[in-house]
Amino acid sequence: MVVERRHDMGTGGACFCPKCGEKIPHGRGIPCQEEHCPRCGAKMLREGSYHHELLEKKRSKKDLE
């Protein structure tokens, strides 16, 4: 069975590094999580994605403590 990956994020946007904050343009057809940060080598995240939202929530909880 073939699993189709569609996240409906559209074209454009940016990938960012959750460790150092580096941003690169999102490449069409290449998931940001498959990209590595050119500065520190960590896996990138897509701005506005579900994982980006989770990271922001986690960071805001830490700031409140």
Image (spheres, rainbow, N blue to C red):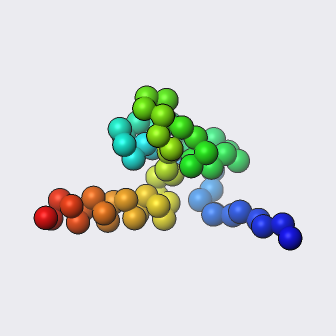
Q: Is residue 56 left or right of residue 17?
A: left
Residue located 43% across and 58% down the image = 52
Is any part of residue 12 visible from this angle?
no
The percent coordinates of residue 8 (x first, y second) are 63, 63
For residue 28, above or below residue 65? above
Q: Is residue 33 left or right of residue 22?
A: right
State the residue lying farthest toward the bottom.
1
Q: Quadrant of the N terminus?
A: bottom right
Q: Nearer the viewer, residue 51 or 26?
A: 51
Residue located 47% across and 61% down the image = 51
For residue 39, above or below residue 54? above
For residue 48, above or below residue 20? below
Q: Quadrant of the C terminus?
A: bottom left
Residue 27 placement: quadrant: top right
Q: Nearer the viewer, residue 43 or 31?
A: 43
Is any part of residue 47 visible from this angle?
yes
Residue located 58% across and 40% down the image = 35
The percent coordinates of residue 12 (x first, y second) are 58, 46
State the residue lying farthest toward the left.
65
For residue 37, above or below residue 30? above
The percent coordinates of residue 37 (x first, y second) are 49, 35
Residue located 33% across and 60% down the image = 56
Residue 6 placement: quadrant: bottom right
